[in-house]
Image (cartoon, helix red, strand yellow):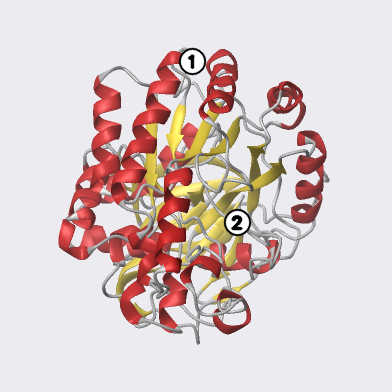
């Protein structure tokens, strides 16, 4: 990967804030040199010198830069490309307090794993303004693909793959292919991320709905019922155990049904983790997908939004609180409404799947702190510390000597309103339009350099560093 060298200040010192880590909170100042945290000291005990950058965090939280382990910048779907480039998407991430993203290199059936990785890395390398990594999608599980994927650990620092139980004909892997991939993960320690939905059954329901003329946006959710998410989670967990207890990570878990399967699998000793996303905590089938055309198209994503009448949101917040759900990621995959979402017409089955949210994750999950759903420490853990640990980002997700100096100053009292008119994503609408938020990012430090301060971006295209990841000791 290319290296970018920029002159950093002698030191960056963050003073007078309340330091919040996953393990606790303290009145501490943070000293950063050469891109790393060098010391965490009691408030008021460090003296700034000539050339130092001093960030005053009085009245604010000082938290680790967030890690979004599931994003899709400039994703080519075959018919369109998600609207955020690596540049625009990482600028938006930075404004939202995210200092590291992990995107995906995608190998499809018949494609070459190593070539897909090299192509994707080249797309990101000169664009990202925050640090970045890649997971490897296996859309064609063959012996050679598995050998190549395994080689990526040492070759490129890629310690995770992604498999799909949905999207037959595009990315789908059958149970035998998934078992072979999970066996490789059990042996190597690589994390297997799984999109868990029964794609074959969903396709039947979609076909039947369209034939009956049921094509409004809400049928995206109605043809992907929570039972088919839960069934796939159960099946993935069984295959993980059969494979030798492979590390298994369920992406974008959206339902109480699926979460119960995670609890059951864990009770059987399965090495299973799960993430959810802000959309499943804040949006619903009735209130958002139920808007009809054109607005409802903005909320088509997979897994889909769930009914507010079935207590999914309540249960997901509970799962975050008790660590049934380990991580909140965004699955950021934005498409402009009329140019892309509706480019093929007004029928739920032809609308590109995805919601843009990389800029708002930290704020939206902070609302759980405001409402008493989460502690400050748990907020930090699910947004920063846990994703860093699970995906082998050993220098990310915490503020301690030796860690990368990725630090966010967060004002817990500032009130803002989400709007497409003011967000930084390359997106003509917002799924969270009009949401009033308590708490906002004020200053963002990435490897010791202030890149966002007081609503101004001061970073540079290409300053983001590719981060090699090792197999995580947390999952072995």
Q: Which of marks 2 and 1 is nearer the N terminus?
A: 2
Indicate the position of residue 222 as horizontal and vertical percent values. Answer: 33, 61
**In the image, is 306 to the left or to the right of 357?**
left
Vertical order, 211 against 37 (above or below): below
Residue at disc 2, secondary structure: loop
Vertical order, 454 against 154 (above or below): below
Instruction: Tell me the CA gap for discs 2 and 1.
Output: 29 Å
Q: Mark 1 points at which residue?
A: 243
Indicate the position of residue 376 as horizontal and vertical percent values. Answer: 27, 51
Q: Mark 2 points at which residue?
A: 72
Instruction: Name the quadrant of the N terminus.
Output: top right
Vertical order, 15 against 299 (above or below): above
- Residue drawn at point x = 27 percent, y = 37 percent: 323
**In the image, is 71 to the left or to the right of 24?**
right
The circle drawn on residue 407 is: none
**Mark 1, other Cα within 10 Å: few <14 / some 14–19 / many ≥20:** many
Quarter-of-image position of residue 136: top right
């Amino acid at each position: 990967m290319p290296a970018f060298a920029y002159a950093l200040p002698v030191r960056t010192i963050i003073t007078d804030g309340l330091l919040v880590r996953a393990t606790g909170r303290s009145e501490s100042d943070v000293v950063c040199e050469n891109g790393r945290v060098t010391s965490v000291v009691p408030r008021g005990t460090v003296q700034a010198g000539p050339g130092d950058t001093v960030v005053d965090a009085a009245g604010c939280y000082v938290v680790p830069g967030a890690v979004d382990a599931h994003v899709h910048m400039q994703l080519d779907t075959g018919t369109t490309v998600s609207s955020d480039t690596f540049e625009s998407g990482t600028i938006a991430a930075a404004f939202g307090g995210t200092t590291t993203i992990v995107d995906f290199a995608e190998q499809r059936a018949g494609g070459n794993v190593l070539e897909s990785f090299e192509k994707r890395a080249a797309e990101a390398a000169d664009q990202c303004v925050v640090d970045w990594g890649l997971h490897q999608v296996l859309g064609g599980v063959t012996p050679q693909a598995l050998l190549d994927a395994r080689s990526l650990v040492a070759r490129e620092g890629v310690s995770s793959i992604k498999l799909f139980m949905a999207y037959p004909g595009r990315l789908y892997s059958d149970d035998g292919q998934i078992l072979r991939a999970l066996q490789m993960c059990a042996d190597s320690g690589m994390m297997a991320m799984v999109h868990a939905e029964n794609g074959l059954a969903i396709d039947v329901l979609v076909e039947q709905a369209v034939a009956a003329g049921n094509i409004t946006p809400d049928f995206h959710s109605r043809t992907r019922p929570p039972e088919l998410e839960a069934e796939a989670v159960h099946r993935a967990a069984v295959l993980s155990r059969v494979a030798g207890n492979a590390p298994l990570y369920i992406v974008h878990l959206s339902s109480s049904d699926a979460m119960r399967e995670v609890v059951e699998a864990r009770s059987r000793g399965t090495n299973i983790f799960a993430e959810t996303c802000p959309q499943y905590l804040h949006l619903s089938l009735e209130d958002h997908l139920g808007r009809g055309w054109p607005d409802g198209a903005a909320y088509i994503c997979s897994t889909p939004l769930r009914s507010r009448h079935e207590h999914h949101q309540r249960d997901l917040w509970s799962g975050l609180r008790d660590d049934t759900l380990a991580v909140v990621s965004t699955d950021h995959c934005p498409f402009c409404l009329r140019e892309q979402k509706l480019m093929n017409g007004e029928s739920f089955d032809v609308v590109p799947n995805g919601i843009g949210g990389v800029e708002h994750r930290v704020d939206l999950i902070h609302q759980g702190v405001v409402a008493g759903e989460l502690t400050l420490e748990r907020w930090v853990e699910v947004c920063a510390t846990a994703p860093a640990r699970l995906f082998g980002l050993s220098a990310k997700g915490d503020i301690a000597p030796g860690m990368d100096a990725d630090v966010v100053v967060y004002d817990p009292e500032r009130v803002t309103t989400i709007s497409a008119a003011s967000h930084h994503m390359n997106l003509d609408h917002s799924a969270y339009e009009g949401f009033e938020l308590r708490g906002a990012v004020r200053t963002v430090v990435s490897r010791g350099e202030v890149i966002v301060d007081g609503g101004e971006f001061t970073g540079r295209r290409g300053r983001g560093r590719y981060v090699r990841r090792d197999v995580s000791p947390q999952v072995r």
